[in-house]
């Protein structure tokens, strides 16, 4: 994934993770943008592994997106206790005696 | 006399009532879970002190479960933890906050582990490493393992100058003392906190070779998790994919591994800038 794409996806994930959907004063977004500005020309300003900053960005992106997707699946499938008679009837396509035919 | 009789009747009635009321409830067991703590703060931020960076929830300083103050040396790590706390909705779901949990474990060290304990734990893992156990009864699976796992083993052997060999049956692979010494030397070079992250990565992937490959940036997080689940993915093709089991475990492993990799990287990276002298 290219640097720009990672940045866009990171900001997207941060926006989704933020409680009000706004990252105007989010610390993480500001930090990520500052890092991108710093390494705009090249990442190889420090004696570090090649593409380390991009790798870290990608890893953080994976972290945020996996957590969000995990929560989505969890919310959809986690048990909410016993179903009501109506829910069960809807599930298997039956009608209740009180329903109109 | 009359009064006593009345009392007796009332008591009998009460007992009877009680029994009647309890009888249907006896069959249903009600479980009482501790509810997660509510989100008690509005804003999170990061403070920088002389010992490192601290996370602040409104005006309260974040503390670890043991009660010691939360201080990390890396600024991005503190920012990530603050973001994670900010991302909680109504309740603080501590079991899903892997990055914060890892920081807490590293600060508190609840099992009182020393560096030697952790290195020994990791070394003992080599003999049960996922990628070293391969299977040659099914040719498709065998091809997949040779194509996907063998390059990683080869990379590991080259990088750490070891000679780990895969095994095709239930006998564990032979790990020579020399190989163990070489890997131990590499692991010893990490700090105590970083090793916590390393153990978390190894426990997630069930493989020290894959964990090293991710931390050394040879693989991405997604690829490493896919390699750790290689046989599962292979079997899924025949038996079907169940979202609430397979996808859930994949996402969980990915977020755990990503947390561990971030933790290790942010803990060992210290950069300082040295200016050139201009004469």
Image: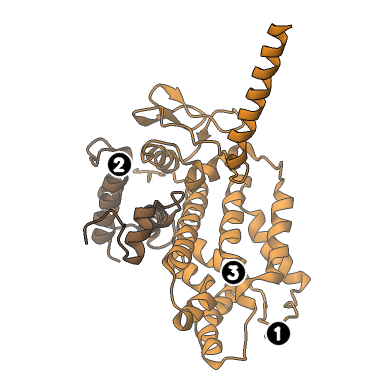
Q: Where is residue B205 drawn, in percent x and y?
A: 56, 64
Is residue B177 in sight in this rendering?
A: yes
Label 1 secondary element: loop
- How far apart in space, not on screen, are marks 2 and 3 (Cα)? 36 Å
Label 3: which secondary element: helix
Neighbour class for label 1 at 10 Å: few (<14), some, many (≥20)? few
Dot 2: within a 10 Å radius of its alpha carbon, few (fewer than 14), some, or many (20 or more) residues? some
Q: Colour of chain A?
A: brown
Quadrant where the N terminus of chain A is found in the figure? bottom left
Q: Are marks 2 and 1 in contact (CB under 8 Å)?
A: no
Q: Judge by depth and name the residue closer to the eye, B190 or B278.
A: B190
Identify the residue under disc 3: B209
Q: Position of residue B161 (x, y in %)?
A: 64, 73
Quadrant location of the C terminus of chain A in the rendered image: bottom left
Question: Residue B82, located in which quarter of the rendered image?
Answer: top left
Up the image or down, B21 lies above or below B200; here it is above
Percent x, y of residue B181: 73, 65
CA distance for labels 2 and 1: 49 Å
Q: Nearer the viewer, mark 3 or mark 1?
A: 1
Nearer-the-camera pick, A82 or B139? A82
Residue A29 lies, with reference to residue B63, above or below; the image says below
Discs 2 and 1 share one subunit: no
In the image: residue B212, left or right of residue B180: left
The reply to the same-chain question for discs 2 and 3 is: no
Quickly name the residue at label 2.
A18
Would you name the residue on which mark 1 appears?
A: B169
Q: Residue at x 30, y 41 (%)?
A: A18
Tell me the shade of chain B: orange
The numbered disc on residue B3 is: none
Categorize mark 3 by other alpha carbons within 10 Å: few (<14), some (14-19), many (20+): many
């Amino acid at each position: 994934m290219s640097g720009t794409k990672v940045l866009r996806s990171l900001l997207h994930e941060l926006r989704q993770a933020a409680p009000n959907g706004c990252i105007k004063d989010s610390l993480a977004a500001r930090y990520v943008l500052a890092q991108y500005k710093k390494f705009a020309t090249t990442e190889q300003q420090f004696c570090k592994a090649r593409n380390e900053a991009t790798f870290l960005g990608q890893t953080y992106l994976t972290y945020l997106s996996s957590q969000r997707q995990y929560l989505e699946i969890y919310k959809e499938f986690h048990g909410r206790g016993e179903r009501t008679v109506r829910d069960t009837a809807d599930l298997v396509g039956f009608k209740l005696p009180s329903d109109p035919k | 006399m009359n009064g006593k009789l009345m009392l007796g009747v009332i008591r009998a009635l009460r007992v009877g009532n009680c029994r009647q009321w309890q009888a249907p409830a006896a069959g249903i067991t009600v479980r009482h879970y501790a509810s997660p703590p509510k989100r008690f703060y509005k804003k999170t931020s990061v403070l920088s002190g002389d010992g490192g960076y601290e996370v602040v929830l409104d005006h309260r300083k974040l503390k670890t479960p043991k009660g010691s103050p939360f201080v990390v040396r890396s600024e991005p790590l503190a920012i990530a933890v603050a973001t994670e706390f900010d991302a909680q909705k109504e309740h603080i779901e501590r079991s899903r906050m892997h990055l914060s949990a890892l920081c807490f474990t590293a600060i508190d060290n609840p099992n009182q582990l020393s560096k030697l304990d952790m290195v020994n734990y990791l070394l003992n893992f080599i003999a049960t490493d996922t990628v070293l156990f391969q299977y040659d009864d099914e040719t498709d699976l065998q091809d997949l393992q040779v194509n996907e796992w063998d390059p990683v083993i080869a990379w590991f052997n080259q990088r750490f100058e070891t000679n780990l060999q895969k095994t095709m049956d239930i006998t564990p692979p032979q790990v020579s003392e020399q190989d163990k010494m070489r890997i131990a030397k590499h692991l010893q070079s990490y700090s105590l906190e970083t090793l916590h992250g390393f153990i978390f990565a190894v426990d997630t992937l069930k493989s020290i070779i894959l964990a090293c490959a991710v931390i050394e940036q040879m693989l991405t997080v997604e690829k490493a998790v896919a390699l750790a689940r290689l046989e599962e993915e292979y079997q899924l093709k025949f038996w079907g994919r169940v979202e609430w089991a397979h996808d859930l475990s994949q996402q969980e492993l990915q977020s755990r591994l990503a947390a561990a990799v971030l933790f290790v990287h942010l803990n060992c990276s210290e950069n300082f800038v040295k200016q050139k002298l201009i004469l």
